[in-house]
Image (cartoon, helix red, strand yellow):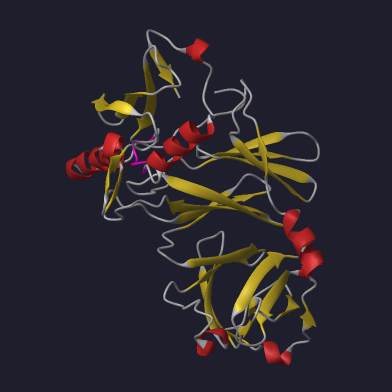
């Protein structure tokens, strides 16, 4: 829909790269104003809708896809993957990523950490070493051991990369955990199998300066225009059992809205005061299945209020309704609601 925030836009050198938030497409605009389009409709993200994180480097941007969190992770599992869009609109892939922890991106590639690595501040040994994997835009993978745990990495242009490490395990203080970090510059080019930070000149991290530097790497959200290029995902493949379980997950989220809260000595209470006569109905077939939740409420005594949720995204992947009932409660409790004049046929969509 025109006007919605459909793009994440970041400046890379003299170019800008815009990545669609919900479609497999990016637009690279060069300094001469010429636009090149990159697409990746066949990227397999499994059966779960995904969220995209955009990380920029001097060579382009990485688009990292992670499956959306679900209350039951066994339903319609997704796949993590990453796409690299170059300044010439070339497309490279790093997939699958599994549950690897994302550290950052530099001209060397996408930096990842073993998902089994502990982040518990009480486990001192976990902060004295690191094992990372750097995935390149061409699909190559390089593993590297580090004698300190990496805190973050960001691209530094022609200089290579800025790498910050924890110089010691976290220390507890009355104000909370204290993390001591220092950084160094890692030049572009081949990476070693072992990175010894103790052999490199380290400087303390300037918190204010690094926040400014990182802020410059955050994409801007830009509205989608009527004539912007579009792209569609290849339809996902879901098992019949996953489709049924996904629909049930959404309907269960809104079960018993009229007796949502219970206590050991209290009568059941509705989701919010005044809510009554709830009804949860399933409409349509996959992938256009939607769940309609309607009820009566004092805000609109003349009719029913309704919230409609799509169970699957445009590609047919399950879109988990995590905390959807809580979001409904917050909207009703705070009055963030459409005007009554927008009701149609005795139904006010909210």
- Which quadrant is the N terminus positioned in? top right
Most foreground residue, 66 or 133: 66
Instruction: Identify the residue at image location x=38%, y=54%.
Output: 79
Could you say where residue 201 lies in the image, as x and y percent from the top left? 78, 86
Q: Is residue 105 left or right of residue 262?
A: right
Which residue occupies the extreme left position in the image? Answer: 241
Residue 198: in magenta span: no
Q: With respect to residue 34, does 180 lie above or below? A: below
Most foreground residue, 200 or 140: 200
Instruction: Identify the residue at image location x=64%, y=24%.
Output: 225
Q: Does any portion of residue 66 appear in the rendered image?
A: yes
Q: Is residue 7 left or right of residue 41?
A: right
Could you say where residue 303 lies in the image, as x and y percent from the top left? 37, 14
Instruction: Identify the residue at image location x=51%, y=90%.
Output: 125
Most foreground residue, 132 or 252: 252
Q: Quadrant of residue 258?
A: top left
Task: Count every numbered label the image shows and give the total.
Answer: 0
Could you say where residue 270 lies in the image, as x and y percent from the top left? 33, 36
Which contiguous range is marked in magenta?
315-320
Q: Does any portion of residue 288 appear in the rendered image?
A: no
Q: Is residue 289 left or right of residue 197?
A: left
Most foreground residue, 282 or 8: 282
Q: With respect to residue 39, does 218 lie above or below? A: below
Which residue occupies the extreme bottom position in the image? Answer: 199
- Which quadrant is the C terminus positioned in? top left
Instruction: Identify the residue at image location x=37%, y=31%.
Output: 309
Q: With respect to residue 181, does 89 lie above or below? A: above
Could you say where residue 112 lies in the image, as x and y percent from the top left? 52, 69
Q: With respect to residue 90, does 118 lie above or below? A: below
Which residue occupies the extreme front position in the image? Answer: 265
Magenta region, main secondary structure: loop
């Amino acid at each position: 829909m025109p006007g919605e925030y459909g793009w994440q836009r970041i400046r890379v050198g003299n170019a800008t790269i815009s990545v669609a938030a919900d479609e497999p497409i990016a637009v690279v605009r060069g300094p001469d104003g010429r636009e090149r389009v990159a697409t990746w409709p066949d990227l397999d993200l499994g059966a779960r809708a995904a969220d995209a994180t955009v990380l920029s480097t001097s060579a382009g941007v990485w688009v990292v896809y992670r499956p959306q969190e679900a209350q039951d992770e066994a339903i319609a599992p997704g796949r993590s993957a990453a796409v690299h869009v170059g300044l010439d609109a070339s497309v490279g892939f790093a997939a699958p990523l599994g549950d690897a922890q994302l550290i950052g991106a530099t001209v060397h590639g996408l930096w990842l950490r073993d998902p089994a690595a502990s982040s518990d501040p009480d486990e001192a040994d976990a902060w004295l070493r690191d094992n990372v994997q750097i995935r390149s835009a061409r699909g190559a993978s390089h593993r590297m051991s580090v004698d300190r745990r990496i805190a973050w990495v960001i691209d530094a242009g022609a200089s290579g990369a800025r790498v910050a490490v924890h110089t010691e395990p976290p220390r507890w203080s009355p104000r909370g955990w204290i993390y001591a970090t220092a950084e160094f510059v890692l030049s572009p080019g081949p990476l070693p199998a072992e990175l010894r930070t103790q052999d490199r000149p380290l400087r303390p991290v300037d918190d204010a300066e690094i926040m400014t530097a990182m802020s410059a790497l955050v994409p801007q959200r830009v509205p989608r225009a009527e004539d912007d290029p579009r792209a569609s995902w290849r339809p996902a493949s879901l098992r019949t059992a996953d489709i049924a379980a996904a629909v049930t997950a959404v309907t269960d989220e809104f079960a018993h809205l009229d007796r949502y809260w219970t206590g050991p000595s209290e009568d059941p209470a509705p989701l919010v005061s005044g809510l009554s006569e709830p009804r949860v109905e399933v409409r349509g077939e996959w992938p256009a299945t939607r769940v309609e939740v309607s009820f009566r409420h004092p805000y609109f005594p003349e009719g029913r209020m309704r919230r409609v949720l799509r169970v699957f995204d445009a590609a047919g992947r399950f879109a988990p309704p995590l905390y959807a009932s809580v979001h409904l409660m917050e909207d009703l409790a705070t009055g963030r609601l459409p005007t009554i004049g927008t009701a149609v046929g005795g139904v006010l969509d909210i």
